[in-house]
Amino acid sequence: MPRVVRVLVLADTHLRSDRPGWLPDAVTEQIHLADVVLHAGDVLDRGVLERLGRQAGPAPLHAVLGNNDAALAGVLPETKVVDVAGVRIGMIHDSGRTSGRARRMRRRFPDCDAVVFGHSHEPLATTGEGDQLLFNPGSPTQRRMQPRPTFGWLVVQSGRIVDYRIETI
């Protein structure tokens, strides 16, 4: 049976290494289950990025620059494409307005099976143009207008995404 790859997806954690507080237990208790961790921006500083990498353990951590990540400019790219077991995932922090998003993301990441993004703190899991998955995990720390904080999971097997979900905290 082909290997199942579990991808933990975060965005908009807005944590600082010089202040108290960390990710909710619901995230830290599950991060060890991930084979890959993706963070779609607004990490805020290198200390948080390093701590997240340690918690992910052997799972690779991929992150992109968010609009609040001035301290990580030059460290994180604005966009990134990662291959996860044959699935190409584009990463960007701000996907722009809702109107036209599917077309814009398909143009920006034409060869990607999925695009992971953040910025709005609004969880979203939907298919766009050409069945490209558009996935925003929301925020596990700042729910803003959402009823609960959230994060996400993608499950990859045999070169395709076989499951995706938003987890509420």
Image: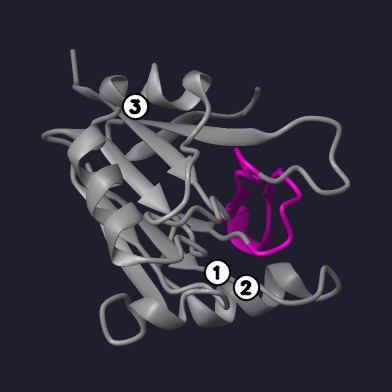
Q: Which element carries disc 1, helix, strand or loop?
A: loop
Inspect the image, locate mark 3, and give the three-letter code of the amino acid beneath it: Ile
Taking the magenta stretch, the answer to whether it contains residue 21 is no
Inspect the image, locate mark 2, and give the three-letter code of the amino acid beneath it: Asp
Which quadrant holds the C terminus? Answer: top right
Q: CA distance from mark 3 to mark 1?
A: 21 Å
Q: Which element carries disc 2, helix, strand or loop?
A: loop
Instruction: Give me the residue at 56% from left, 81% from top.
Output: 107
Residue 31: which numbered mark, if any?
3
Instruction: Give me the residue at 52% from left, 56% from top.
Output: 116
How many residues crowd around disc 3 within 10 Å: few (fewer than 14), some, or many (20 or more)?
many
Which quadrant holds the N terminus? Answer: top left
Residue 94: which numbered mark, if any?
2
Task: Give the tally of numbered discs.
Answer: 3
- Residue 53 relative to residue 142: left or right: left
Q: Position of residue 42 (x, y in %)?
A: 52, 64
Q: Position of residue 146 (x, y in %)?
A: 84, 40
Image quadrant where residue 150 sits: top right
Instruction: Give me the residue at 63% from left, 45% from top.
Output: 139
Inspect the image, locate mark 1, and give the three-letter code of the amino acid beneath it: His
Q: Which residue is mark 1?
A: 93
Taking the magenta stretch, the answer to whether it contains residue 137 is yes
Q: Earlier in the sequence, mark 3 or mark 1?
A: 3
